Image (cartoon, rainbow, N blue to C red):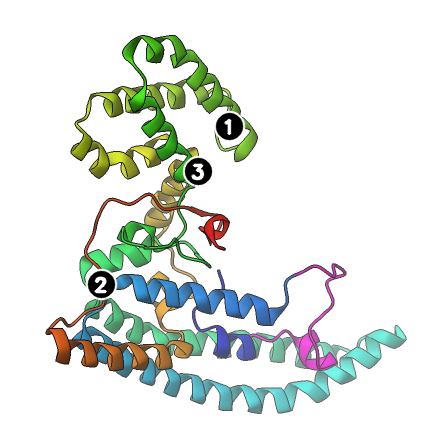
Amino acid sequence: MRCTCAVGMAVIGATWAGLAAGQPMPTGNPFVESDSITELRSFVTKINLLNGLGMTLSQLAKVRRILTEADDARQVALVAQKRYEAICVPEFERLRSIVWDGTPLASDVYERCKALDDGNRLLQNAYLRSLAPLEEKLRIVLTPAQRSLVDRHADCMVPAPNLQDPERIGQAGNGFAYVALLKEIRKLPEAEFQARKNEYSALLIQGVEGDFGLVGRKEMPALVKRCDDVVEEARKLPDVRFALRVGKMAEEMDPQIQDIRLKNLRVENDLDVVGGLGKVGRILLDVRLLPVVADRIKKLQAQTAQTGSSNLLKGPGPVAESCTKGRCAVGTLK
């Protein structure tokens, strides 16, 4: 995922080659995603997260003030970057001419260009330091549950339809297949179930090996046992209890979700800090979210006037939702 401060950092963090040439460096691969698509994808995933947090009107008002401060910091950084660019471009164009000709690089040219390149990093660090206090303000605005959702968030471009489970704001495993399997198994008479248990285990192993490659041969027996235990539980549960539990039971069977949870655990242990900013800052301090937040405030004010409710969050409920590699429910779209 790109830094939350994508717009400002994209400008400030331009490489010296990009400044000298006046355009992005070619990658050699014509199918590399363009910056505009990458930025749009990043922006959409952040809006999905903002929607899923279900902030109150009071929270959104505070977030808008914080984002306004972030935009002020960005404007200051852009002015500094313009000054930096005015100095860098002539020096780097001179460097380009020298290396193009293959002539020896004089020590003074080397030292100047190195200092300018180091200055770029100093500008970036100063910008990030200016955002760190704003991230702390954001964390205070969020509830513990909302902070947890942000910390565990993984990119999601297209949210599942009728999204209700807050854990599904970001990327999750493709639970539909496991939910369908559990429902099918529940319908089987006991004798037929016992006769087909090995068949289901074989199908599970085949699917896991061919799908994600997340489970090695050594780990496979433990996964099969866990799935067998889930199946046994599914057959014993009353209908109402099964309806409430089936989504979580499917997650327990899904190796992709288990892998994501392990990654989340490692992220928590590492504090997931990049450039001095945690995940809350990198995602929610994107100034492009300002008009989105303003729109949410307007809608909430209208909703509050009509119903007295001051948030847009739907009530939680059991739901089987799918999101695979950031393309949530794409297969269900028509």
Query: Closer to the N terminus: mark 1 or mark 3?
Result: 1
The image quarter containing residue 255 is top left
Residue at numbered disc 2? 313
Residue 296 in the magenta stretch? The answer is no
Is 285 placed left or right of 82 in the picture? Answer: left
**Nearer mark to the viewer, of 1 and 3:** 1
The residues bearing labels 1 and 3 have C-alpha atoms spaced at a distance of 12 Å
Give the residue displayed 35% in from the left and 34% down from the top: 179
Q: Amino acid at mark 3?
A: Gln
The residues bearing labels 2 and 1 have C-alpha atoms spaced at a distance of 35 Å
In x, y percent, where is residue 204? 45, 24
Residue at numbered disc 3? 256
**Nearer mark to the viewer, of 3 and 2:** 2
Query: Closer to the N terminus: mark 2 or mark 1?
Result: 1
**In this rendering, does residue 276 appear at all?**
no
Q: Amino acid at mark 1?
A: Gly
In x, y percent, where is residue 186? 29, 23
The image quarter containing residue 107 is bottom right
Q: Which mark is residue 207?
A: 1
62 to 223, vertically: above or below: below
The residues bearing labels 3 and 2 have C-alpha atoms spaced at a distance of 27 Å
From which residue to which does the magenta span run?
A: 13-32
Query: Closer to the N terminus: mark 3 or mark 2?
Result: 3
Q: Mark 1 touching mark 3, by CB under 8 A?
A: no
Residue 30 in the magenta stretch? The answer is yes
87 to 312, vertically: above or below: below
Q: Main secondary structure of the magenta part?
A: loop
Q: Residues within 10 Å of mark 3 (few under 14, many from 20)?
A: many
In x, y percent, where is residue 244? 21, 38
Is 208 placed left or right of 302 in the picture? Answer: right
